[in-house]
Amino acid sequence: MKHDEVKEKIESIKEPSQYLRVNDSHPLELYLGKNDQNFATLRFNGVFSPIKVLGTNLIEVKQVKTSRYNSILFSFNSNENLSLFYHFCVDMINETQNYSGDDAYKEIVNRFNQWKKMFSISNKTLSENEVLGLIGELLFLEKYAFKTYGITNSLNAWSGPEPTHKDFSYKNEWYEIKSINSFKNSVSISSLEQLDSELDGHLIVYFFEKMSPNFSGISLNKLVSNISSTLTYEIDRDLFFNKLKQAGYSFNEIYDNYVYNFVKVEKYLVNKDFPRIKANTLPKEINKVQYDILISLIEKYMED
């Protein structure tokens, strides 16, 4: 099932306490609809032994028993940011295709517990530059690190949310990820730690072109959803959501306004000759350094 199909089913229901089965081919009795307060709800009816499940400030969990079956209902207590709930429903529906009975209930509860970190209200939203930077780090994980180092190792090695570390470091290798608009001719280094190391490393520069929100390009919410859907192990999904939370991300439809066209990616070897400022070359009185590197002048360090 897809995002738009979930949205269409829920929006077709105009009265509270009404539900439509997700589809006839799904092995579980999963329903989309509205609860008694008219909030969007995913409902599962089945034969299972209920356990205690705690909701969040955005999503209410309710369990009821009838003479024929038990039910667990997940209701989104807001009329804003519904896109997140639709993604949650899609994940629940698609990932329970091969479950039945108590196993289905346990899988539903486990997946909800993994998603809980995303169902939080944050007073802080990321700036556009922070959004673009996080997109670059996520693309690096998805397109390169996962395939090179494995998913769990890559997520453990991702320290981008920690401002005093390299974005990605694994054993003797490290990577600093930068995302810039395609018209820019420089990258900003915001701290000494980003490029300062006795070990050779890599500077990865992603170039993007900002597009209109209607463009079918790369956006932060979509990228997070796509990556989370590929994480089949609970430990990986939990680690991924923890890293996102550490980076200041929680789902917000505001981020859907920032849509980009991927232009290219360039990789540079940061060795002893690479132009950078190192801590051991600075007077001890200097505490913090920020500087820009001109891309056109570091072409000789470019890697394949």
Image (cartoon, rainbow, N blue to C red):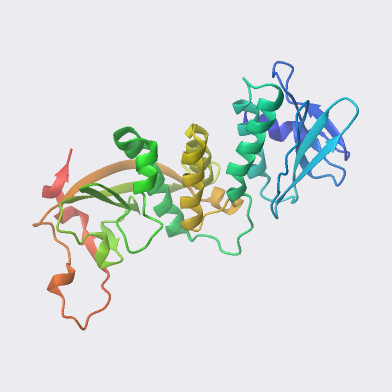
Query: Residue at coordinates 84% horizontally, 44% vertically from top-left?
Result: 38
Q: Residue furthest left?
A: 273
Q: In the image, residue 56 lies at what x, y percent?
A: 69, 52
Residue 33: quadrant of the picture = top right
Q: Is residue 121 above or below residue 35?
A: below
Residue 98: quadrant of the picture = top right
Relative to the observer, which residue lies in front, 153 or 87?
153
Work out which quarter of the rendered image holds the C terminus and state it: top left
Q: Is residue 256 above or below residue 127?
A: above
Relative to the observer, which residue lies in front, 174 or 295?
174
**Can residue 208 be seen by looking at this rendering?**
no
Query: Residue at coordinates 20% horizontally, 62% vertically from top-left?
Result: 196
Q: Is residue 172 left or right of residue 254?
A: left
Q: Is residue 192 left or right of residue 162?
A: left
Q: In the image, residue 278 lies at what x, y percent?
A: 17, 67
Q: Residue furthest bottom?
A: 285
Q: Is residue 274 left or right of residue 233?
A: left
Q: Residue furthest top?
A: 25
Q: In the image, residue 117 lies at what x, y percent?
A: 58, 50
**Can residue 264 be seen by looking at this rendering?**
yes
Q: Is residue 93 left or right of residue 209?
A: right
Q: Is residue 30 above or below residue 114?
A: above
Query: Residue at coordinates 46% horizontally, 54% vertically from top-left?
Result: 131
Relative to the observer, which residue lies in front, 103 or 281?
103
Q: How many marks?
A: 0
Q: Is residue 257 above or below residue 282?
A: above
Q: In the image, residue 233 lies at what x, y percent?
A: 49, 34
Relative to the observer, which residue lies in front, 45 or 192?
45
